[in-house]
Amino acid sequence: MDTDRRRTAGYARVSTDFEEQLTSYAAQVDYYTHYIKSREDWAFVDVYTDEGITGTNTKKREGFNQMIADALDGKIDLIITKSVSRFARNTVDSLSTIRKLKEKGVEVYFEKENIWTFDGKGELLITIMSSLAQEESRSISENCIWGQRKRFADGKVTVPFARFLGYDRSPDGSLIVNPSQAAVVQRIFTLCLGGMTPYSISRTLTGEKIKTPTGKDTWNVSTVRSILTNEKYKGDALLQKTYTTDFLTKKRKINEGEIRQYYVENDHEAIIDPHTFDLVQRELARRSRNKQSYSGLYTFSAKIKCGQCGSWYGSKVWHSNDKYRRFVWQCNHKFHGSHNCSTPHLTDTELKNMFVIAANQLFSQRKHLCDDYAMQKERLYATASLEARQQALAKEMQAISDRLLPASLKNKFPLSDRQTLQAYYNKLTNQLEGAKEAYDQLSMEISEMHMRKSATEDFFLALRQSPETITDFDERIWRTLIDHVVVYSKEDVRFVCKNGTEITCAGRIG
């Protein structure tokens, strides 16, 4: 290559893949190829391109990054591009890149603005033009966000996933049920209510060679958990779960109350009925509150409690290497400390047989329990007094906040009396913190009351739907009616129901 000719490259970029933009993209490539080759003082190197890539930062622009790398490696003397906004809409990126190129003796020419970076005024003009381009990007981003939030406020749901297990997209973008995939979703919810954890469900689906939502062979825990907690499967939609924090980096963050969310009910056809969905949410919440890590590996995992020390029973294998091998449940702290627990071990068969007797005792009391609950439920789960106290605290916090306003403080004390003013401010702040703590405590109590009421309602619904008697262990009845078992002795095993009813199964059951 003739050393007197400047080695010249072109750069072309379009930010969308719309047909008219692609036409512009092809035209840019053709133009720069012929333009550079037509100049006798330039030697054509290449036209570097980025198709359908945003210009707000340079991290993902492979063509741009390759061009800069080649220039810094001494392969390019001059870069020609259409405009400052084509080069970069981020002022910092634009200026830092141009300065790196200048240090290596590489010039950039922006045709539209007629700016040469080796010109004395070039950097000042680029700073101004890049800032204008950046503000244009900000404006476009804010307009897009406004439009999206307006759609949310109007209840128009957008699902930002190319694949959404259980649903397909109709021509108008709405969700329609995919029957074969919906069966997988229903199975995941059934397995969870059957006692399995997200981990064991993921292992089961992987073992059965069921494809993940993205078409992969291996399921992971987070995928299963996201399905179990996604309100869209009951036909609703919570909008704006995440949001973009920076229009330049496009970084997204989970919405933790920073911006408004919208909840749309009955937006599309449900795969999971609302009652089942809510049951699963309460079951997941119950497991997370359990002091011992929940395990869904066995039917009785984290369900049997020692009546002496309060610890949970765990599974143990006796005679693991001989013909007398057997599996038992035993207090995990039986041999911890100086005082050993005397509570007995139990086998699966013993526990299942005891449950059959306890369940039939419960069924015999069904009418009395249901009638008694119907008479007392309004009193048992009344939250009116708690809510009245909460409202009073809300008014108190508002009044304190008003007194904390600068104008209020100035009117009460002269600005010169700073010490008195600070003491007054600290007093009001402490009062506000105390009221807020009390308000949060009441909120927690009200929430727990609602959860207990919902769990009790579920219990009585399941009790009404149960058979008159059972002769064999039924895992569905076990899961829906029994909260846990407390073992005091072989002759005193108590089944604690989810409504708090306690049934003692007396006598050893073989």
Image: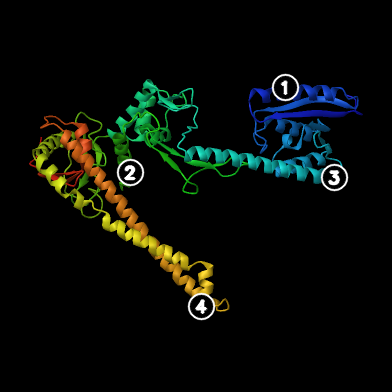
- What's the residue at 46%, 34% (across, down)? 157
Mark 1 surroundings within 10 Å by alpha-carbon count, few (fewer than 14), some (14 through 19), many (20 or more): some
Number of numbered callouts drawn? 4
Q: Earlier in the sequence, mark 2 or mark 3?
A: 3
Q: CA distance from mark 4 to mark 2?
A: 48 Å
Q: CA distance from mark 4 to mark 1?
A: 73 Å
Q: Which residue is mark 1?
A: 26
Tell me the amino acid under the disc marked 2. Answer: Ala
Q: Earlier in the sequence, mark 4 or mark 2?
A: 2
Tell me the amino acid under the disc marked 3. Answer: Lys
Give the secondary structure at mark 2: helix
Q: CA distance from mark 2 to mark 3?
A: 64 Å
What quarter of the picture does the N terminus occupy? top right
What quarter of the picture does the C terminus occupy? top left
Q: Nearer the viewer, residue 218 or 243?
A: 243
Q: Nearer the viewer, mark 4 or mark 2?
A: 4
Give the secondary structure at mark 4: helix
Residue 154 in picture, x, y percent from top left: 47, 38
Determine whether label 4 and label 2 are within 8 Å by CB. no
Residue 224 in picture, x, y percent from top left: 39, 33
Q: Which residue is mark 2?
A: 285
Q: Nearer the viewer, residue 326 or 441?
A: 441
Mark 3 surroundings within 10 Å by alpha-carbon count, few (fewer than 14), some (14 through 19), many (20 or more): few
Q: Is residue 270 visible?
A: yes
Q: Nearer the viewer, residue 219 or 97?
A: 97
Left or right side of 256 for 112 = right
Q: Is residue 330 visible?
A: no
Q: Earlier in the sequence, mark 4 or mark 1?
A: 1
Q: Which residue is mark 3?
A: 121
